[in-house]
Image (spheres, rainbow, N blue to C red):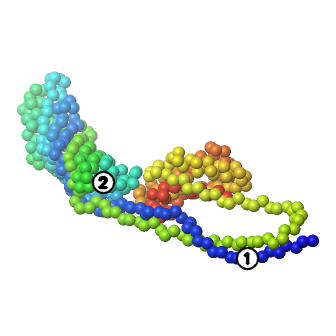
Amino acid sequence: MKKTILSCLMLLAGLSASAQEQKGTTEYVFEPHWYIQVQPLGGQYTLGERGFGKLLSYNVQAAVGRQFSELWGARLTVGAWQSKGGSKYTTVGKEYGWKWNYIAPTVDATLNLSNLFAGFNPNRVFNLTAFAGLGANIAWNNKEAAAADAAIASDLKFPAGTQMLAYLWDGTKVRLVGQFGALADFKINDKWSINLEFSANTLNDKYNSKKAGNWDWYFNALAGVKVNLGKTYSTRFIPAPEPEIRYVEKIVEKIVEVPAPAPAETAETAAEPLRRDIFFTIGKTVIRKSEQQKVNDVVAYLQANPEAKVNVTGYADAGTGNDRINDRLAAARADVVVKALKKAGVSASRISYDSKGARVQPFADNDSNRVSIVIAE
């Protein structure tokens, strides 16, 4: 009977690089900054009884502000020029109109909606900002209202000196005003932009001299330019990490004599785990056609290995957005992969999932962290 001699001839050490070459990435970093707004083209509509066109007047505004973060800022605005009022009396078939001057400094809090929903991007051409604030409306020169009041009394045959406008005022009046609205910026370059603004402003019932039993309102539409003072952002380069080196031992065996083996049962070798990284574009949670094959690979693996299960973990990149946005994106990226697996026939009992937001970054390259990592084993 032949004997088998097994000899170990050599032990080799090999080096293999476990990662592909990466070039690193450039990240935008927000810089707090001051800015100035000048809006010389404006119109105001004061809510009242007359036709729309008869209650329109010219308006201007200037502002100085500071952007403290990607989302929040504050500004001091000064709007001014003219408001209009009016009243109709059907009994005499007449309407009466008057105007007066005002200036209104207000302090607003601002919220950049574009950065809130799409992340900070200094190269974005269009930015939408919401604002709300309080201030003072300083009004004067209400002589036309006094003349209209006298004309109304005369036309209605009331005694001379009868006051028809219950809240008729003269001199200079200071009233609290609240305003809110939206501001659209169209970027020309890092320093200059063109802006359009719409605001709604409300005061007490005595602003237009009439007693109506509700708040008085005027609405401003403005156009002008915005000038940023100083840098609005900087850049930071994040180098790619050094490739990970993994040592692999290789054993070479030589069989000198081979006997006639008796049939024996052999255990089936377990399949190696399968990992697929499904990448997404910024702010998106849709599996692209270029990534669909990775989902197909996972489905094929699970079909070939009925005992295997799969875990899906969603991520978002830390370079854009905030924790609330990134948590939502990461969860949605995990969810869309889970739905794709279920649609392909994978049982829900074989699927587990999680999301890490941007608190965990599996890749050194910022953009690569817009990903769902799928591991089947």
Other residues around mark 2 within 10 Å, as few (<14) / some (14–19) / many (≥20): many
Q: Which residue is mark 1?
A: 9
Is 364 on the left-hand or right-hand side of 141? right
Quadrant in the rendering for residue 141: top left
Residue at the far right: name it.
1
**Label whose residue precedes the other's in the sequence (1 or 2):** 1
Residue at the far left: name it.
160
Residue name at image x 65 percent, y 49 percent: 299
Q: Position of residue 89 (x, y in %)?
A: 17, 27
Is 142 on the left-hand or right-hand side of 367? left
Q: Position of residue 119 (x, y in %)?
A: 39, 54
State which mark lies toward you, 1 or 2: 1
Q: Is residue 249 above or below residue 327?
A: below
Considering the numbered disc 2 on the image, is that residue within a helix, a strand or a loop?
A: strand
Q: Using the image as rendered, state which of residue 355 and residue 291 is in the foreground.
A: 291
Q: Which residue is mark 2?
A: 110
Residue at the far front: name it.
256
Which labelled disc corresponds to residue 224? none
Q: Amino acid at mark 2?
A: Thr
Q: Position of residue 41 (x, y in %)?
A: 17, 43
Residue name at image x 55 percent, y 67 percent: 17
**Quarter of the image containing the C terminus?**
bottom right
Quadrant in the rendering for residue 170: top left
Is 33 on the left-hand or right-hand side of 251? left
